[in-house]
Image (spheres, coloured by chain):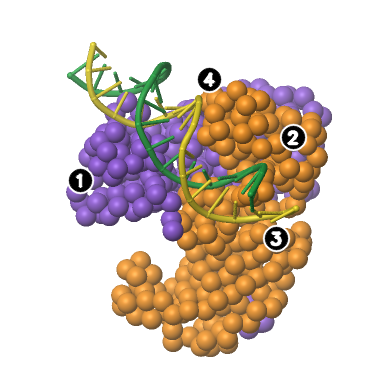
Chain colours: A purple, B orange, C green, D yellow
Amino acid sequence: MANRYQHVADELRRLIDAGVWPVGERLPPESELAERFRVSTPTLRNALEVLQSEGLVEKRHGSGNFVRRPEPRLRYLTGSWSTHAPAGNTAVVVHCETAVAAADSRLSALLNVTVGSPLTEYIFVSHSGAWPRTLVRVYVPETAGQLGSPTDGLSPWGDSVRHRLAADDIHVVATTEQITARFPTADEAHALHITSRTPVLALERLGYDANQCVVEVALLVLPGDRSEVLVTTDSPIKKLETTG
Amino acid sequence: MANRYQHVADELRRLIDAGVWPVGERLPPESELAERFRVSTPTLRNALEVLQSEGLVEKRHGSGNFVRRPEPRLRYLTGSWSTHAPAGNTAVVVHCETAVAAADSRLSALLNVTVGSPLTEYIFVSHSGAWPRTLVRVYVPETAGQLGSPTDGLSPWGDSVRHRLAADDIHVVATTEQITARFPTADEAHALHITSRTPVLALERLGYDANQCVVEVALLVLPGDRSEVLVTTDSPIKKLETTG
DNA sequence: CAGTGGTCTAGACCACGAA
DNA sequence: TCGTGGTCTAGACCACTGT
C-alpha cells in the first residue's frame, strides 16, 4: 500500500526508537543500510529524508547520518512579541547583515513604493548549536534609519527592526502572518545548510501602522525539522459559546 | 551553484509566467520536457515538484501536469473562529466520518486519559473543486456525546466538534496551535490525493477548557500547494512600543 | 488499449569532512 | 586521501486516466 521507502522509514524509526543506535550516534553508511534493506540508495535516501523531516535524524554531508538529540525545536511565537528568547530556546546566536535592495514588483506593491526604489534589507540567521536554524529577511523602506547592525542579543525573528522603526516613530500596531509549506530555494537551502528537499515553513509577516499601511515585510524560512510556529489564543471564543 | 533541477524549475516558471502554456492547460509530457531540457526524467520531475509546492503546477496521475488556475489557497484563520467560511473560500464541500479510536500514548497524555481508552475520532476531508484540500482529525474523550455526522454546511476545520462539546457544556476557552512542515504519511497522502513528496503544513491544535485541561486534540494536515495558515494580530504590541 | 505520471533500480560522478 | 552523503542518469516497470 505505502511506498517502499516509507516501509524502510518505518523500520528505521522502529530501530531508532528501540535504541539500536544511541542518540547522537552515527547510523551505518547509506550504502550499507541500502544493502541491508535490499533497496537502492535513492530509495534509502528517501526514507532518511522522511525521518529527517520528522526531526529524528540529522544528515551531515561528508560525515554521516546521526540520530538527532531531542533538542527542542526553535519556536516562533506569534501574537506575543518579546525581546527575550522564550523558554526552551537556549544559546541561540544570531547574525545580522544589512544591505540595500531594490523593490521587486511584489515588495513594491506591499510597501506602496515604486518598483526599483531602494529598500533596506536585514538578513538574520540564527544558529543554535553548530548549525543554522532560522533565516529571516526583513524589508523596510530606506527612509527608515539604519540599524547599524548590532550583533549581540538579537532575536532570531528580526524584532530589532521593529525597535529601529519605533525609534523613528513608526509603530507597528497590527501584524498578519501567512504560513505555507514548500521547498527552500537554492539560496535558502545554502544559508540554512539544509538539502533543497527539506520541507520548510515559509512565513510572510506584514507589519501595519495605525493607518493600515504596511511598513515592514518579513520573510521567515524555518526548516521543518528544526523549528516550529506556536500560536496561542488565550481569549475565550465568543462566537462558539453563543452559537453552541 | 544551484541544483540542476532548480535551474529547470526556474526555466519552466519563466515559460509559464510568459504564458507559453495558458492557465489550466496541460504541459507537454514529462518525457518530452526532459528531452527538451536535456535532463533525465527524475530530474525533470524534481523540478515539477518544486513548481507544485509553489502552487504553480498541478499534477494529475495518468492525465498530465497542468498550469494551475490561480484559485486562492484555502485559508485556515487562526485566532478567529467562525462558522462561516472566510471570504475567498468558495464551494468547499466537507465530508465527515466518525469512528472510535483507542488513545495512543501521545493522545492519552494530552487528554489525561489512560492509554487505550476509547476516543471519538472525527475525520474531516474538505474538497474544493475536484480534489481534496484539507484533512483534519479531531479527538475528544468518548464521554462527549456523539456528533451524529452532520454532513452539510460543515467547516473544514472541525469547528462542529466544538459546537458539539459546547452542547455538552464543555467550553473551549483557549487554544494553542503548533505548526511544522513535513512530508505526509502514506495515509495522509492517500486521503489528500497528493504525492508523499509534497510538503504539508502539520498543525496540532489543543483546545483547553477553563481548568486548563485539554479537551480536544486536532491534527490538521494542509498540503503546502493548496492551503495556508493566516495569523492576524490586531492588538497593539505593548512591549515594543514601550521599549522602542 | 494507449498515453500519462509514479516508483524504483544500479550505478556514475561530484562535494564535503575528518584524519 | 578516503569514506561519506548529494546529485544525476537511463531505463524498467507499475498505476491511473480517458478513449
The disc numbered 4 marks a residue on which chain?
B
Residue drawn at 66 percent across, 74 percent down: B154
Disc 4 residue type (three-letter): Met
Tell me, for residue A22, which label it has, or none.
1
**Closer to the eye: label 1 or 2:** 2
The reply to whether label 2 and label 3 mark residues of one chain is yes
* Cα–Cα span, label 1 and label 2: 48 Å
Name the residue tied to disc 3.
Answer: B130
Pointer 1 local density, CA inside 10 Å: few below 14, some 14–19, many at least 20:
some
Whether residue A232 is visible: no
The reply to whether label 3 and label 4 mark residues of one chain is yes
The reply to whether label 1 and label 3 mark residues of one chain is no
Disc 1 residue type (three-letter): Pro
Name the residue tied to disc 2.
Answer: B16
First reached walking from the N terminus: tag 2 or tag 4:
4
Name the residue tied to disc 4.
Answer: B1
Residue drawn at 44 percent across, 34 percent down: A194
Disc 3 residue type (three-letter): Ala
**Where is B116 relative to A203, above or below?**
below
Asked if labels 1 and 4 touch by Cβ distance under 8 angstroms, the answer is no
